[in-house]
Image (cartoon, rainbow, N blue to C red):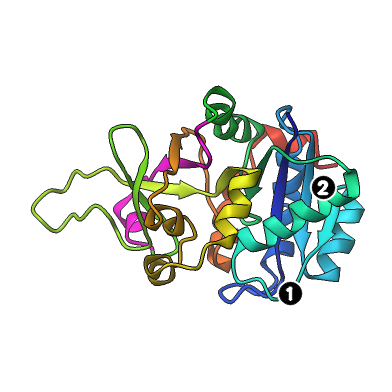
């Protein structure tokens, strides 16, 4: 099975311009994401998808193939889909599963990639998977930069929000506090189907791509991970991630 990872990245982040190349322990953040993703033995290839020549040049320098995409994409899924089509054209080989890995997840591990893909290898009816992790504090639960998820008893997503859901304001303090971890495998044909669908009202309101799937009546399987993950949305997050990664044993595999 042809399984690849695509890491969409652009320099023009509204919240943190230049974020992909922000330094973490002597390497741009995007380098950590790409090199750690590429360690997964589940993958046949890892690619960066971007609209910025600066990122293309960086990818070449670390030996990760990069795909130049349009600068008009508003969603990471759009950029990923364009990259998949170009990769297929270049390689002459159709992709079966594409793992979309956000470029602001520098604590990604190859085990996380493998865990996200596993349900799709076991069950051909699973079209989309997200990882999810426990949120360690109420402060993080209330942080709008963290995408929260509520699931049913089968770990299928019921709702995604940047607001703290489920509510803690009804006299119940102990609620499941779960966050989306942006390692998202799609079956290739389902990604193309998804991108052909119009944006949906709750997707726009919540600014969460996965809501489009739920609003159209499809399923997103959430896979729990115990891995410690911190994404980078602000310069303050970068400092926190850098501190958390100092003792990370994976660094020895790629930092010289």
The residue that disc 2 covers is: 88
In the rendered structure, find residue 71 and report the number of the disc placed on it: 1
Identify the residue shown where x is 36% and y is 35%.
155
Q: Which residues are magenta?
A: 125-143
Tell me which numbered mark, 1 or 2, is placed earlier along the sequence.
1
The spot of residue 101 in percent (x, y) is 64, 49
Q: Is residue 36 left or right of residue 135?
A: right
Give neighbour class at mark 1: few <14, some 14-19, many 20+ (Cα, 10 Å). Answer: few
How far separated are the C-alphas under marks 1 and 2? Answer: 20 Å
Q: Is residue 116 left or right of residue 11?
A: left
Q: Is residue 202 above or below residue 214?
A: below
Front-most of 170 and 42?
Answer: 42
Q: Is residue 124 magenta?
A: no
* Residue at the extreme top of the image, as rendered: 122
Q: Is residue 235 above or below residue 122?
A: below
Front-most of 153 and 187?
Answer: 187
């Amino acid at each position: 099975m042809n399984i690849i990872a695509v890491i969409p990245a652009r320099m023009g982040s509204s919240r943190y311009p230049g974020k992909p190349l922000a330094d973490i322990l002597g390497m741009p953040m995007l380098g950590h994401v790409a090199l750690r993703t590429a360690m997964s033995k589940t993958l046949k290839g890892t690619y960066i998808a971007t609209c910025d020549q600066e990122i293309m040049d960086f990818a070449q320098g670390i030996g990760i193939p990069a795909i130049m995409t349009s600068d008009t994409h508003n969603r990471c899924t759009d950029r990923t889909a364009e990259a998949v089509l170009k990769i297929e054209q270049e390689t002459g080989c159709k992709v079966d599963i594409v793992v979309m890995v956000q470029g602001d997840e520098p604590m990604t591990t190859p085990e996380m990639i493998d865990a996200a893909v596993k349900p799709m290898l076991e069950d051909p009816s699973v079209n989309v998977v997200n990882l999810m992790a426990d949120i360690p504090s109420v402060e993080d639960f209330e942080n709008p930069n963290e995408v929260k998820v509520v699931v049913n008893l089968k770990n299928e997503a019921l709702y995604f929000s940047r607001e703290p859901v489920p509510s803690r304001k009804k006299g119940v303090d102990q609620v499941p506090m779960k966050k989306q971890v942006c390692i998202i495998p799609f079956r290739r044909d389902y990604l193309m189907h998804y991108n052909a669908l119009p944006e949906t009202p709750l997707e726009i309101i919540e600014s969460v791509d996965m809501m489009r799937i739920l609003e159209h009546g499809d399923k997103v399987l959430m896979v729990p991970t115990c891995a410690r993950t911190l994404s980078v949305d602000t310069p303050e997050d970068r400092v926190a991630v850098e501190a958390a990664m100092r003792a990370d044993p994976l660094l020895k595999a790629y930092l010289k």
